Amino acid sequence: MQSPRAIYMDYSATTGVHPDVLAAMMPYLGPEFGNPNSIHSMGVAARQAVEDARARVARVLGCRPSEIVFTGCATESINLAIKGIVRAQGRTGHVITSAIEHHAVLHSVEQLEREGYEATVVPVSSEGIVDPDDVRRALRPDTRLISIMYANNQIGTIQPIAEIGRIGREAGVPVHTDAVQAARSESLDAEELHVSSLALSGHKFHAPKGVGILYLRESTPLEPQQVGGGQEGGRRSGTENVPYIVGIATALERAAGMREEYRRHTSRLRDEIFEGLLRELPDVRINGSRERRLPNNVHVSFRGIEAQALLMGLDMRGICAASDSACQQAALQASHVLQAIGVPEDYLYGSLRLTLGDDSTEEDVQYLLDCLPELVRRLQALSPAAV
Ligand code: PLP
């Protein structure tokens, strides 16, 4: 049971830069170092690279190039969208979001609440899905924004964004979606999704860390957060990160071009893991919907064990995985997502997220299934809470 190499099963945390992406970036890290805002020939070449990248991203999103804003990460895109769209409509009002959003969304909404705005946090079902009717019912005459994520970063559930987008459109309320985890496998067509705003992060699809995208539908109100030289149409000032912008466009095109292949490859391995775990560990709990779920996401909980011990045990066996409970100041904190879907107390701290990617193999899965059940049984035997 020897691991031949480090087995990476944490592709939802981050991915490596693809060689084609790096190759496309290299000239702009080297000789083509012009500032896109300069008027000389080197500046013009850099500007062309940025505008070409913007047009390529716009093609994937089915929108106009002018509706694309390049940012430093998805956290920035989300902060800009949520606070920028709400504040641009006045100093009071109401926002709708869900209980299972990433903290970039939840903390942005909380910041608005501290400024006097009001928020409704809609629940999710025990499968981790938002009911569009809950969103409809939460609408108020002063609702400024609906922000619901496309796919959850922990349990991988996919939300009915097009339906929620339509509800917002009919009510005249902009809809923002955090599409960070959906980028590899789901359609990002802004028109089909009826959204006004959508955030993406390069490092989730083989571009470098530190570059993001914000799609912002034309005429959506926006108060910029970062002011200065007026770049990105005045929506995000700061000299454009040319190599990273070229990188994210190349990576997004690549991801869009191989969506079906990615879905087929990762979902087959994901289902093998689910079946293997259910066979070996009858009391394993699968978190989130089996059907409306990212093709590369396995999220399970084991009774009576602590995720940290499990992750360390897997790491010692050469497997890189994740959980969702953060250990802060020696106190175990349960995941807000698992609490929102009603995971019972004895399963709350023993969760495991395995996320697959292009390079995941059948052998990786077999090795995991050789190690994991035995490790779980051993930890459960040591834990009084498991019996
Ligand atoms: N939203 C979701 C759903 C995520 O999974 C992440 C990253 O883990 C982010 C937002 C933040 O992305 P970034 O690392 O680009 O700030």
Image (cartoon, grey):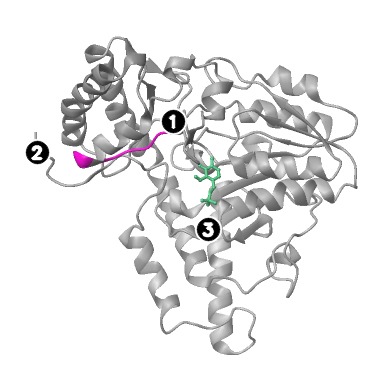
Q: Residues within 10 Å of mark 3 (few under 14, many from 20)?
A: some
Residue at the spot x=24%, y=17% of the render?
381
Q: Residues within 10 Å of mark 2 (few under 14, many from 20)?
A: few
Q: Main secondary structure of the magenta part?
A: loop
Tell me the amino acid under the disc marked 2: Gln
Q: Is residue 66 above or below residue 293?
A: below
Considering depth in this image, is 97 or 54 the residue closer to the camera? 97
Q: Which residues make up the magenta segment?
A: 316-323
Q: Secondary structure at mark 1?
A: loop
For marks 2 and 1, the one nearer the N-term is: 2
What is the x, y in percent for residue 63? 64, 50
Q: Quadrant of residue 193?
A: top right
Q: Secondary structure at mark 2?
A: loop
Could you tell me how far apart the alpha carbons at marks 2 and 1 are, in whole angstroms?
A: 29 Å
Q: Is residue 385 left or right of residue 329?
A: left
Q: Quadrant of the N terminus?
A: top left
Tell me the amino acid under the disc marked 1: Leu
**Residue 2: mark in rendering:** 2
Q: Secondary structure at mark 3?
A: helix
Could you tell me how far apart the alpha carbons at marks 1 and 3 are, in whole angstroms?
A: 25 Å
Q: Is residue 205 visible?
A: yes
Tell whether circle 2 marks a residue whose Cβ is less than 8 angstroms from ligand 1. Answer: no
Q: How many marks?
A: 3
What is the x, y in percent for residue 198? 63, 45
